[in-house]
Amino acid sequence: MIIYYDSLTGNTKRFVEKVKKQRPDWEIIKIVPKEKIERPGHLITFTIGIGNIPLTTTVFVRNNKDYLLSVSSTGNRNWGAHFGEAADKISKHYKIPFLMKVEMSGLQNDVEEFIRLVESI
């Protein structure tokens, strides 16, 4: 299993590190925006501003949408309806299945739910 991720403040990075502890055989890869990937995987990004997709994630998704099996986002519930909205927008615009939203770096139940959802695909 491959998890591609983008992180600015470290929340998404901390979340994928928690996943890695539970699934040490999974490959966790920080995205490089203009890089073309050749293996399918799941994307986790963050939401910036008021529900916006980070530019780094946008470039990566444009180049690799055919290899992305799902999209998830970290965010802060303080943003209300805009919480984790980057995943919603990516899913809708690029037709990539939405997986889940995680607040900040996630709790143990978020990690378990993410693993369960990824393994069910």
Image (cartoon, grey):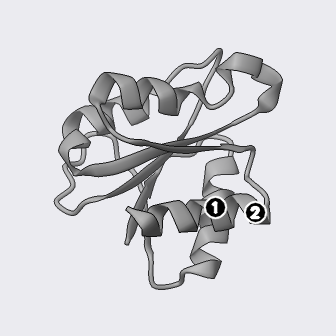
Q: Secondary structure at mark 1?
A: helix
Quadrant showing the N terminus = bottom left
Q: Amino acid at mark 2?
A: Asn
> Of 93 and 113, which appears nearest the observer?
113
Q: Is residue 18 left or right of residue 67?
A: right
The 10 Å Cα crowd at callout 2, few under 14, some 14 to 19, many 20 or more, is few
Q: Where's residue 107, x and y in %?
A: 79, 59
Q: Is residue 20 above or below residue 75?
A: below
Q: Is residue 105 visible?
A: yes
Residue bearing the label numbered 2 = 109
Q: Position of residue 2 (x, y in %)?
A: 37, 67
- The residue lying furthest to the bottom in this view is 25
Look at the picture and state if 114 lies above or below 18.
above
Residue drawn 60% across the image and 19% down it: 51
Q: Name which residue lies at 65% across and 15% down.
A: 50
Q: What residue is at 77 percent from the left and 20 percent from the top? A: 80
Q: Which residue is mark 1?
A: 113
Q: Is residue 10 visible?
A: no
Corner quadrant of residue 65: top left
Mark 2 residue element:
helix
The 10 Å Cα crowd at callout 1, few under 14, some 14 to 19, many 20 or more, is: some
Q: Are marks 1 and 2 in contact (CB under 8 Å)?
A: yes
